[in-house]
């Protein structure tokens, strides 16, 4: 079978035809795509192409495609996000992408409120907490009583006429609870606030319609469900804002004529306006194979399989007496199931040593994240092993 496309499969699960595109699946039970997606075999070839260009073309490679990789890679992500080409650009991580968003606002103005939830990913919370020193008022909506979900009505009520920005996670990293992005965007539009949607835990496993929902910004990355490796985060900016906003976190890629090396920045009126310094070219090469595969498989097909496998994990955990901390309604959760057996951290370490790749998060539990290349048997064996280890 080709490593770039699946062969015809007689299996009841045609997505398993993609398994041998991912070498690590030959020797591990890979249930950790919410943290690091499996590497496609083709990625090694793509990185070799990058190395060959450097070795043979040298500095000429910048004008032969390297300079555009930050936006070209974004265009491969655009259909997964439900946005148009030319509206997504690459950054080294979500914290940097979020800092660019935050720098578009004057936090000393009267509209200076930032509203997010206590279950956001901590790195971006650290960033937005730092805006207090610039005059921002930060409002943190607490978690629901279960500590794993958020009351959407409470979140929407916190967004008012003083709110400038609402940076929230679409899918929460601890529990995979899906927040109602459409409702948040509608409320923000009513009061003139902007929304920055963090789709790191949904892009590639939950269908997205970011442009339809009306989000002003979106951040995320290829590291997880998109199987693109580290250093590959992205920033979407609504196209009509490309000529309006002026991010203070900027750099020479944002210039209309970067190779003029002018002392004053003349901002591009495109997604390049939201770039900073020299692009992370090898990371962009590494992202290509995963993005191509996810686009070919289709997020709708991935989502249907994800709901089936995660529902199976919940049922098996119930049979084995393991507490489930993710939503039981498959339509309200992303691609992860969080289980909370006694001694979860110790159990996770044992599983990793046995080549069952999962992870553990404090105040949550063990996260199991099957992807389109996972099998039912792998999910069953992982839950059974957790039950055995919890029983001592």
Image (cartoon, rainbow, N blue to C red):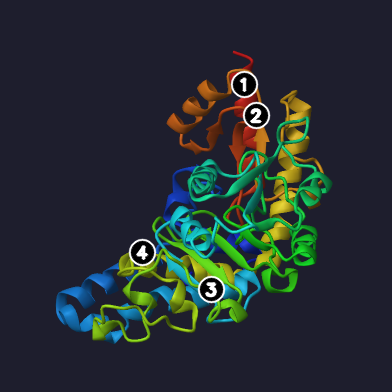
Is the residue 285 above or below the residue 95 in the image? below
Query: Whole-percent x and y of residue 358?
Result: 53, 38
Which label's residue is closer to the chain start, 4 or 2?
4
Q: Residue at coordinates 65% horizontally, 23% vertically from top-left?
A: 341
**Disc 2: which residue:** 384
Left or right for 196, reference 293: right
For the residues labelled 4 and 2, the Cα–Cα distance comes to 37 Å
Quadrant of the rendered structure where residue 186 is? bottom right
Work out whether residue 12 can be spotted. Answer: no
Q: How many marks?
A: 4
Q: Residue at x 69, y 50 (%)?
A: 334
Q: Does residue 319 appear to the left or right of 69 in the view shown?
A: right
Q: Which quadrant holds the C terminus?
A: top right
Q: Are marks 2 and 1 in contact (CB under 8 Å)?
A: yes
Which of the 4 image quadrants contains residue 294? bottom right
Q: Secondary structure at mark 3?
A: loop
Helix, strand or loop at label 1? It is helix
Q: Which residue does the numbered mark 4 point to in the structure image? A: 283
List the residue tagged with mark 1: 388
First in residue order: circle 1 vs circle 3: 3
- Which sits earlier in the primary sequence, circle 2 or circle 3? 3
Residue 26 location in percent, x, y? 45, 49
Q: Nearer the viewer, residue 245 or 27?
A: 245
Residue placed most toward the observer, 144 or 16:
144
The image shows residue 18, relative to residue 24, as above or below, that is below
Q: Residue at x 62, y 49 (%)?
A: 375
**Front-most of residues 104 and 227:** 104
Q: Which of pointers 4 and 2 indicates the residue nearer the eye?
A: 4
What crowding class fits label 4: few (fewer than 14 Cα within 10 Å), some (14-19), or many (20 or more)?
many
Nearer mark to the viewer, of 4 and 3: 3
Mark 4 element type = helix
Disc on res. 245: 3
């Amino acid at each position: 079978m080709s490593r770039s496309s699946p062969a015809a499969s007689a299996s009841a699960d045609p997505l398993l035809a993609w398994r041998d595109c991912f070498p690590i699946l030959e020797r591990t039970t890979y249930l950790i795509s919410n943290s690091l997606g499996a590497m496609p075999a083709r990625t090694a070839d793509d990185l070799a192409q990058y190395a060959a260009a450097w070795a043979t073309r040298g500095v000429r490679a910048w004008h032969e495609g390297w300079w555009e990789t930050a936006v070209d890679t974004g265009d491969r992500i655009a259909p997964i996000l439900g946005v148009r080409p030319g509206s997504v650009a690459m950054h080294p991580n979500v914290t940097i992408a979020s800092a660019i968003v935050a720098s578009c606002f004057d936090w000393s103005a009267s509209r200076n409120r930032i509203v997010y939830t206590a279950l956001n990913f901590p790195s971006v919370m650290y960033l937005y907490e730092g805006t207090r020193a610039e005059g921002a008022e930060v409002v943190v909506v607490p978690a629901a009583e279960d500590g794993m979900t958020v009351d959407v009505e409470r979140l929407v009520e916190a967004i008012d006429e003083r709110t400038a920005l609402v940076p929230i996670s679409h899918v929460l990293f601890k529990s995979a609870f899906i927040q109602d992005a459409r409702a948040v965007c509608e409320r923000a539009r009513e009061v003139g606030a902007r929304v920055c949607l963090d789709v790191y835990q949904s892009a590639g496993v939950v269908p997205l319609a970011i442009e339809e929902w009306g989000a002003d910004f979106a951040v995320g990355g290829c590291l997880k469900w998109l199987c693109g490796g580290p250093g590959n985060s992205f920033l979407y900016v609504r196209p009509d804002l490309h000529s309006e906003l002026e991010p203070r976190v900027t750099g020479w890629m944002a210039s209309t004529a970067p190779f003029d090396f002018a002392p004053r920045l003349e901002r591009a009126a495109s997604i390049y306006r939201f770039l900073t310094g020299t692009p992370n070219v090898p990371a962009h090469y590494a992202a290509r194979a995963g993005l191509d595969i996810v686009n070919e498989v289709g997020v709708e097909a991935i989502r249907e399989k994800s709901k089936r496998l995660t529902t199976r994990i919940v049922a098996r955990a119930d049979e084995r007496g393991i507490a489930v901390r993710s939503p039981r309604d498959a339509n309200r959760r992303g691609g992860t199931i969080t289980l909370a057996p006694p001694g979860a951290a110790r159990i996770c370490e044992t599983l990793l040593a046995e080549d069952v790749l999962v992870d553990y998060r404090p105040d949550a539990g063990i996260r199991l994240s099957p992807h389109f290349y996972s099998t039912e048997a792998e999910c069953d064996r992982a839950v059974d092993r957790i039950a055995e280890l919890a029983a001592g």
